[in-house]
Amino acid sequence: MKIYTVINRDEDYCEEFYDLPSAKKAMKEHNAKGYITKVYANGDWVNCGEILLKGNNKTFVANSKQISKSY
């Protein structure tokens, strides 16, 4: 599961989403930054970096068994 966190500290805005389009929409509306966190079934989590409004949001998670970039 992936969690998309959108934060704007100037407006004191922070919200979590579970789908990328909703997170991007909130980023545009609140002029905020977004971050992707991958959560595994056993409770472990990995920070996958920032959400990009333009371009590809596929990431390669270091120190994992992942062999290709994915969402």
Image (spheres, helix red, strand yellow):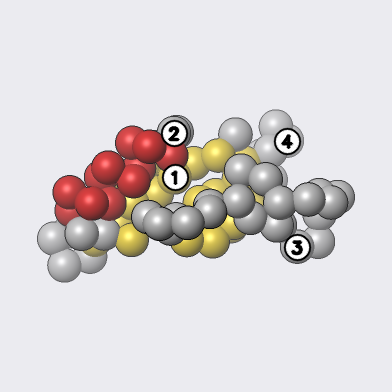
- Type of residue at label 2? Asp
State the SS at label 2: loop
When asked about the image quadrant of residue 32, the answer is bottom left
Q: CA distance from mark 3 to mark 4?
A: 18 Å
State the SS at label 3: loop
How far across and how far down the image is residue 10, in percent? Answer: 16, 67
How far across and how far down the image is residue 61, in percent? Answer: 71, 57
Q: Residues within 10 Å of mark 1 (few under 14, many from 20)?
A: many
Residue ID at (22%, 65%): 9
Decide which of tag 4 and tag 1 comes sooner along the chain: 1
- Type of residue at label 3? Ala
Asked whether residue 59 is in view, the answer is: yes
Look at mark 4 in the image and give the residue it sits on. 42
Q: Nearer the viewer, mark 3 or mark 4?
A: 3
Closer-to-camera residue (37/52): 52
Single out the residue that lies furthest toward the bottom. Answer: 10
Residue ID at (70%, 32%): 41
Q: Residues within 10 Å of mark 3 (few under 14, many from 20)?
A: few
Closer-to-camera residue (36/67): 67
Tags 1 and 3 in contact by the CB under 8 Å rule?
Answer: no
Decide which of tag 3 and tag 4 comes sooner along the chain: 4
Look at mark 3 in the image and give the residue it sits on. 62
Look at mark 2 in the image and give the residue it sits on. 19
Residue 43 higher or lower than 10, as above or below? above
Residue ID at (17%, 49%): 29
Q: CA distance from mark 3 to mark 2?
A: 22 Å
Tags 1 and 2 in contact by the CB under 8 Å rule?
Answer: yes
Q: CA distance from mark 4 to mark 1?
A: 19 Å
Decide which of tag 1 and tag 3 comes sooner along the chain: 1
Look at mark 1 in the image and give the residue it sits on. 4
Decide which of tag 2 and tag 4 comes sooner along the chain: 2
State the SS at label 1: strand
